Image: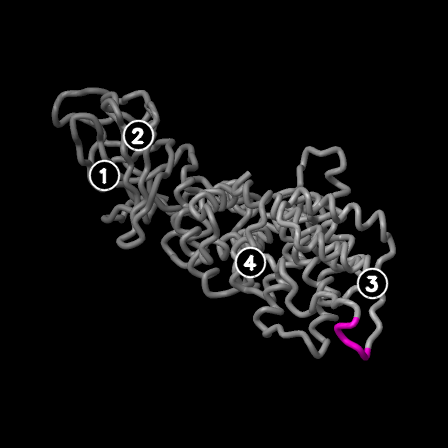
Amino acid sequence: MIMQKHLGRSAVIWGALMLAPLFVQAPAARGAQQSQQPSYTMPEYNQFTNCQSEKDLTAKTKCLDAFVIAYPHSTLMQYVDEMYYQTYYQLKNYAKCIEYADKLVALDQADIARRAQASQVRVQLFPYAFNPKAPDAQKQLTSERDAAAQGVKILQAFKATPNAKLTDAQYKNLLALFYASAGLADFQLKDNAAAIEAFKSALENNPADAVSEYRLGLAYLGTTPPQSLDGFWALARAISLKVPDADKVKDFLRKSILSYEQPGCDSQVDPQLSELLQLAANAPTRPSTYTIPSHDDLTKISASSTIVSVLSDLSAGGDKAKMTWLAVCGAEFPQVVGKIIDVQKTDTTADFMVFTSASADEMQAATTANMDVKVWIAPPPAGATTAQVTPQPNVVRLQKEDEIRFSGTITSYDPSPFLLHWDQVTVDPSIIPEKSAPGKRAPHRIPSK
């Protein structure tokens, strides 16, 4: 999968982990404040401070273990749990770090600032601790999703307190972190509908979050049926926001559009992709007027098209021409009849400038070509991009004003002056004149009606 490392590692970090208390003071010793009676004993406090001052990290965890055994119901437990997860973070034991962050969050009596801080630590470190191959992977993801949702509520409660020293930007960034974490868990749980809503909430709080935009696009594409257009738009916007591995994401987006649309010529996706990237860079959400035709849309156009209707649609220009060309580029048409306006020959090809119409009278009167029909009269040179065809050297007997009847593939067109280009052409042998003496050849004329 594109950007797999970003699905397994947290790419939305809004600053350094808040591993030091920001808003609450550490517990004071008995007697430090004469007007208040501490809710813990002096031996209890001394053992706590011994753990706090321990420099060796492994020894510190053992000290904390001993404290919990001695004082399982201590009122200092929020500080103990905080010291636990800080220590395990330094030891790079992220699973244990999350375990004790969860313990602190679950302490309803703990200070709301510490619970908010622990919630942030928990969701930020989860991608580093998570193993998708673990037997309990689904349970871990569910816990992460629930923890992120709880983190939103705790953060909102904290923001409402008088001591919450968060700017609006910090608050929104932290909200975005929680929503993005929930979205990633939902995505990995294959709950794409929930992931979409979570990522949209993340982007409401931080519109510049390229990774959430990318993941939103994947969630849209993962729904049943896929919400392809919204998915394409989100991926394009992620590219404009300089998502990591942007070139790979762009290639993935191109392939996704190609698979959705399946146009006659793969190259037709490139201008669509360029337009999409330009539009998405300036708009967070897809306008209802923006669309890309699906394969079914193009199939309906192709099935109802004749060469005459194709010429009419392409000549008209605009959206109709774009849709028609997406449907018929690279298509084969059998038994096309026209009048030769001119012939240009090389050693290997005969290029017939041809006019065709639904009206025989129009073809008789025509003096300007609307098609360029290339016929190979010798094998294509080595390295030629054209498909292999059987050369027809006898077509050189066809001349100006003659009728031509052929089957072939349309490859491109010039909008002005209009000219439709053909390749891989096979001329109906029955209209090629027999070789005869000069001046005695009977021309094949377009019959008038």
Q: Is residue 274 left or right of residue 395?
A: right
At 56% from the left edge and 60% from the top edge, which residue is drawn? Answer: 14
Dot placed on the residue nearer the N-terminal end, 1 or 3: 3
- Check disc 4 and report the residue beneath it: 16
Do labels 2 and 3 touch, CB within 8 Å? no
Q: Which residues are magenta?
A: 31-35
Mark seen at residue 385: 2
Q: Is residue 246 left or right of residue 300?
A: left
- Check disc 3 and report the residue beneath it: 108
Residues under labels 1 and 3: Cα distance?
93 Å
Q: Amino acid at mark 2?
A: Thr
Q: Amino acid at mark 3?
A: Asp
Question: Compared to 241, does 437 lie above or below?
Answer: above
Q: Quick one: SS at disc 1?
A: loop
Q: How many marks?
A: 4
Do labels 3 and 4 touch, CB within 8 Å? no
Residue at the far right: name it.
Answer: 73
Residues under labels 2 and 3: Cα distance?
72 Å
Residue 228 position within the rendered picture, expressed as x and y whole percent measured from the top left? 58, 50
Mark seen at residue 415: none
Q: Quick one: SS at disc 3?
A: loop
Q: Quick one: SS at disc 4?
A: loop
Q: Is residue 242 visible?
A: yes
Q: Amino acid at mark 4?
A: Ala
Dot placed on the residue nearer the N-terminal end, 4 or 1: 4
Dot placed on the residue nearer the N-terminal end, 2 or 3: 3
Residue 323 position within the rendered picture, expressed as x and y whole percent measured from the top left? 46, 51
**Viewer-proximal residue among 364 and 124:** 124
Residues under labels 4 and 1: Cα distance?
80 Å
Q: Quick one: SS at disc 2?
A: loop
Residue 363 position within the rendered picture, expressed as x and y whole percent measured from the top left? 31, 45
Residues under labels 1 and 2: Cα distance?
31 Å
